[in-house]
Image (spheres, rainbow, N blue to C red):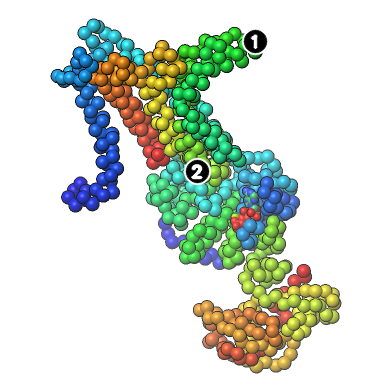
Amino acid sequence: MSRPGGWKRLLPTVGPGAAWLVLFVLVPTLLIFYASFLQRDAHGWLTGPLTLDNYRRFFGLDAGGFDLLYLNILGRSLLLGLVTTLVAIVLGYPFAFFIAQSPRKNLLLLLVVLPFWTNFLIRAYAWIVIFQRKGVLNAVLGHLGLDPVQLYPSWTAVYVGTVYTYLPFLILPLYASVEKIDWTLLEAAHDLGAGRVPGFWHAVFPQTLPGLIAGILLVFIPAVGTFVISDLLGAGKTVLIGNVIQQQFGASRDWAFGSAAAFVLMGVVLAGLWLYARKAGERGMEELV
Amino acid sequence: MEQRKLFKGKRTRTPGGETLVRLSGVRKRYDGGTEALRGVDLEVKAGEFFSLLGPSGCGKTTLLRILAGFEEPDAGKVVLAGRNMRGVPPYRRPVNLVFQNYALFPHMNVYDNVAFGLRMKRLPEGEVRERVGWALELVDIAGLERRRPHELSGGQKQRVALARALVNEPKVLLLDEPLGALDYKLRKQLQVELMNLQEELGLTFVYVTHDQEEALVMSDRIAVMREGRIEQLGYPEDLYERPASRFVAQFLGTSNLIPGAALEGGRVETPLGTLAVNETLTAGTRVTLSVRPEKVRLRRRDAESANRVRVRVDDIIYTGAENQYLLDAAGFELVAYTLNADVQEPGHEEFDYDEEIVAYLPPENLVVIHE
Ligand SMILES: Nc1ncnc2c1ncn2[C@@H]1O[C@H](COP(=O)(O)OP(=O)(O)OP(=O)(O)O)[C@@H](O)[C@H]1O
Ligand SMILES: [Mg+2]
């Protein structure tokens, strides 16, 4: 602020929001950042002196030699986030249009949010009931004369569960964009010689970008950090970065290492988003968001 | 760019060119049940400025959308530049539409908007640049290339929309109330620019408007529409001077409509007395006589003879250029306009409230409407 009066005048308006952010975002983040440089004492409490050991351990630069364990886990989590987001787009993008043009859009929207009314754990157990060896899926396969499949616990189950859990978070913001589409722009594009595909790409797709981007963020970020889904549908055999972090703060009681892992995850996600935003910006899309 | 000449004299009529648009028996009913078009026939020749005029909801936009290919007619034939358009999608038709709300692409700047059609045709970028430059120059907005639509005024948006369509050199340019959203002054200015553009480039326009004055000023020919049909089609003067129906007489300008019954020898029995007309009529038929307010002659005293009606001045409305007299002819209401410029003319008279005067309805100005 150049003028001293400036920020005093702004305080009443941005003040509450800023205070909220400082209290619930900045302070905890800084605490975790600080903790990630501490060590675990014999009773599992945090103690000094400051060290880089936690980060060394995460990146496999331990005294014991080069070990890619945690980087592998991080890679697995990012892959899960990416695939989940892609599958959610493939399923959710057409579905958002389907809702928007349907005469029963309210019913369809209700169906999209309906799962939120049931506790998440119960829904996860429902998937177990479907996937387990003597479960619903294998019963159906048996009736069709097909061989049973062993899907619980498995990575497939984790992927299905993650897509299932986060799909609504893509559909809802996307639907909000689709609902507002100005279809005369598509007519204008057709009128100017654009066929079906170019017409959609130049006149409709840009209008869905704000919702699509919001949806991608809402799916990708939590999917990368998920641990409950892999706990339940992977039965502890599918370890993700979220499981690692949760374990450090729980059973292992190594808050310092847990903090470091959490911080690396946050750094990677933020870096990814930044790259993505920059690329989008290059293509002149930033005004759309 | 040099200032455009305001007016270029009388517009050339009956362009000799080929017929570019031919509609026959076109009908359209929307899903909702509204019958928007109930059998429309018309032809537009190359180089013609053709207007579709009519009140809101009469089917003008529907007709234009059928030409552009956004709607298929339920019945009838659409032929554009000699080709039957049945089943031809909008992106393969030799026409372009200027949308009522402009429909500019909000995420593209002016240049990209105008270049869109050319790029869809995969023209080389060099040629695109040249032609976009030409189009922007043509509509007088060179220099705004990098602006986004939301950074433009209404008039500028209209120009971009026009350039975006014109740059494709369509055989027929369809315009849906292109000036409807602009203020009066700007509308007048753009009317002249559009007319000059159309004439200079020899373009063919199908122009939708609900503004009768705009249609009269701009068009070579006008089709007056009403409830999905063409009520009358012709040159502007013909429509104004010889309206074929009460609707046209009232929609184009103001008219005194006098109901009557035909008598022998070109006379009509009316509430104003017996009036002579320049037409032989079958005795007994019911007709309506239409006379334009500016064609009613007012005199303080006049020889008692045919087509002269005693009236009392009920009200005088001063509009600047003219005085509008509301007259009471024994219970029947007549309207007459006198030009204020006539004050200098010999024999010009002005009248007062409640004055008893004589209104002369010249037989040659009484249009007989058979309905
Ligand atoms: N998509 C549609 N579905 C159902 N009815 C429609 C549709 N579009 C237009 N109509 C109806 O068809 C009739 C003609 O509409 P149209 O838009 O062609 O009128 P218009 O002459 O362009 O009117 P305006 O001057 O108000 O633009 C109207 O009664 C309108 O309500
Ligand atoms: Mg319309």
The image shows residue A148 at horizontal and vertical percentages of 57, 9
Q: Is residue B11 left or right of residue A124?
A: right
| Disc 2 packing (10 Å; few <14; some 14–19; many ≥20) | few
Position of residue B12 relative to residue A159, above or below, is below
Callout 1: chain: A
Position of residue A101 relative to residue B340, above or below, is above
Residue shown at the point (59%, 8%) measured from the top left: A147
Nearer the observer, B232 or A268: A268
Residue shown at the point (74%, 48%) measured from the top left: B76
- Element on which disc 1 rests: loop
Residue shown at the point (70%, 52%) measured from the top left: B35
Q: Which of marks 1 and 2 is in front?
A: 1
Callout 2: chain: A
- Element on which disc 2 rests: loop
Q: Label 1 belongs to which residue?
A: A145
Contact, CB < 8 Å: mark 1 with mark 2?
no
Asked whether residue B103 is in view, the answer is yes
Q: Label 2 belongs to which residue?
A: A180
Q: In this view, does A180 lie to the left or right of A221?
A: right
Question: Which amino acid, mark 2?
Answer: Lys
The image shows residue A164 at horizontal and vertical percentages of 49, 25
Q: Give the CA distance from mark 1 to mark 2.
A: 47 Å
The image shows residue B91 at horizontal and vertical percentages of 59, 40
Q: Which image quadrant is residue A16 in?
A: top left
The image shows residue A107 at horizontal and vertical percentages of 57, 37
Nearer the observer, B333 or B320: B333
Position of residue B325 relative to residue A126, above or below, is below
